[in-house]
Image: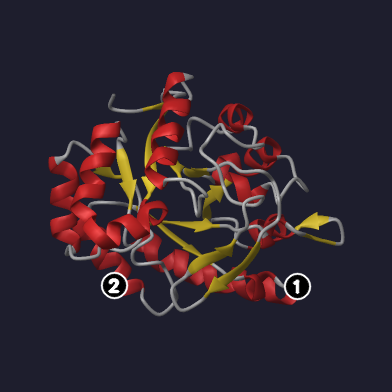
C-alpha cells in the first residue's frame, strides 16, 4: 500500500535566478533544507550525468524533469536524457493558443497522444503540466476535462494553483477530478489575483509580470487550500508533491524554506529533515 504522505520535491525553475549565479550552491542549500527531490528546468553548467551525480551525492534524487520539455520534435532527446537522469516522469505542456477553442484542443490532444505513445514505448510517463488557461471553460466545461477525454491514456502534472484559475475553480475539486491520472502535483500558493502573464514558446516558460498584489507566496501563505489539495490526491497514483513558485516579492530561498516547513511540519509531505 503506497504511503499517503508523499515525498517533497522542488521545481528548480523557482530558483532560476540564483541557479544562474551558482547552481551547485543552490542544490547544496536545497539539500540542507531537507528536500528529497528536485525537478530540473535547465542544467546550467552541468551535463545531465554530472547533474544527477551531484544531486544524488547530496542525498536527493531527481523526481521528474522539465528538461528537456517534451515536444513532438525532441522525443529522442527526451528519451536519451531521461535515461541518463534515471527518471521516468517527464513533463510537457502548451500555451494558451493550443487551448483556445474546441478545434485547438482536439489538435493538441492528437499531438499529445502521439507523443505519449512514443515515450511510453521507451518506458517513460508523459505528464502534461497546466497553466490557468486550460482551466477556463467552454460551454460550461473546463477545457482540461475535454482534453483529458480526448487523450485518455495521458497523465498529468497538475499545477494546483493554476488549476484554481484565480478562484474560478475549487483546487481540491480539480485535484479529485484528475487524481487518477496525476503522478505529480505542483504545490504552489498565492493571493488568487489574476496577474498579467504570457507564455514564452521559445523557452516553454510562463513569464509573469506580477505586481505586489498578484505575486505568488510561500506554500501555506496564500489562499490556496493546500490541506484540501493533499487530501484530494490519490495516494496510489501521486508519487511526488513538487513545490514551485514562479515569482516572489521577497527572497526566493525564504519562500522555499517556508514552503518546506509548512508541508513537512503538518505531515502533508515527507522530507529529509
Q: Find numbered disc 2 in the image and state the secondary structure of the residue it sits on.
A: helix
Q: Which residue is mark 1?
A: 101
Q: Mark 1 or mark 2: which comes first in sequence?
A: 2
- Residue 250 drawn at (x, y percent): 48, 46
Quarter of the figure with residue 231: top right
Give the quarter of the figure containing the N terminus: top left
Q: Is residue 97 above or below residue 148?
A: below
**137 left or right of 47 in image:** right
Which residue is located at x 23 percent, y 52 percent? Answer: 86
| Residue 77: numbered disc | 2
Q: Is residue 89 above or below residue 32?
A: below
**256 left or right of 175 in image:** left
| Foreground pick, 109 / 64 | 64
| Residue 52: numbered disc | none
| Foreground pick, 137 / 19 | 19
- Residue 207 drawn at (x, y percent): 53, 66
Spatial separation of the CA atoms under disc 1 and disc 2: 31 Å
Quarter of the figure with residue 124: bottom left
Amino acid at each position: 500500500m503506497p504511503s499517503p504522505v508523499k515525498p517533497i520535491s522542488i521545481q528548480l525553475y523557482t530558483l532560476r535566478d540564483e541557479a544562474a549565479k551558482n547552481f551547485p550552491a543552490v542544490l547544496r542549500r536545497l539539500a540542507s533544507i531537507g528536500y528529497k527531490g528536485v525537478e530540473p528546468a535547465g542544467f546550467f553548467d552541468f551535463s545531465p550525468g554530472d547533474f544527477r551525480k551531484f544531486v544524488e551525492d547530496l542525498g536527493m534524487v531527481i523526481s521528474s524533469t522539465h528538461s528537456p520539455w517534451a515536444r513532438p520534435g525532441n522525443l529522442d532527446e527526451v528519451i536519451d536524457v531521461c535515461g541518463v537522469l534515471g527518471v521516468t516522469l517527464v513533463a510537457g505542456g502548451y500555451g494558451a493558443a493550443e487551448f483556445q477553442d474546441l478545434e485547438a484542443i482536439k489538435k493538441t490532444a492528437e499531438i499529445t497522444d502521439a507523443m505519449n505513445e512514443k515515450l511510453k514505448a521507451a518506458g517513460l510517463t508523459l505528464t502534461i503540466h497546466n497553466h490557468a488557461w486550460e482551466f477556463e471553460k467552454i460551454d460550461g466545461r473546463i477545457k482540461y476535462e475535454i482534453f483529458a477525454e480526448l487523450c485518455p491514456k495521458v497523465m498529468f502534472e497538475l499545477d494546483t494553483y493554476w488549476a484554481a484559475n484565480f478562484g474560478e475553480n475549487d483546487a481540491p475539486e480539480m485535484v479529485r477530478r484528475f487524481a487518477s491520472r496525476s503522478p505529480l502535483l505542483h504545490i504552489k500558493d498565492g493571493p488568487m489575483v489574476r496577474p498579467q502573464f504570457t507564455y514564452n514558446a521559445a523557452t516553454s516558460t510562463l513569464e509573469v509580470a506580477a505586481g505586489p498584489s498578484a505575486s505568488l507566496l510561500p506554500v501555506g501563505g496564500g489562499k490556496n487550500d493546500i490541506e484540501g489539495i493533499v487530501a484530494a490526491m490519490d495516494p496510489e497514483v501521486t508519487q511526488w508533491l513538487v513545490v514551485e513558485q514562479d515569482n516572489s516579492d521577497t527572497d526566493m530561498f525564504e519562500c522555499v524554506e517556508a514552503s518546506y516547513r509548512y508541508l513537512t511540519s503538518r505531515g502533508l509531505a515527507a522530507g529529509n529533515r
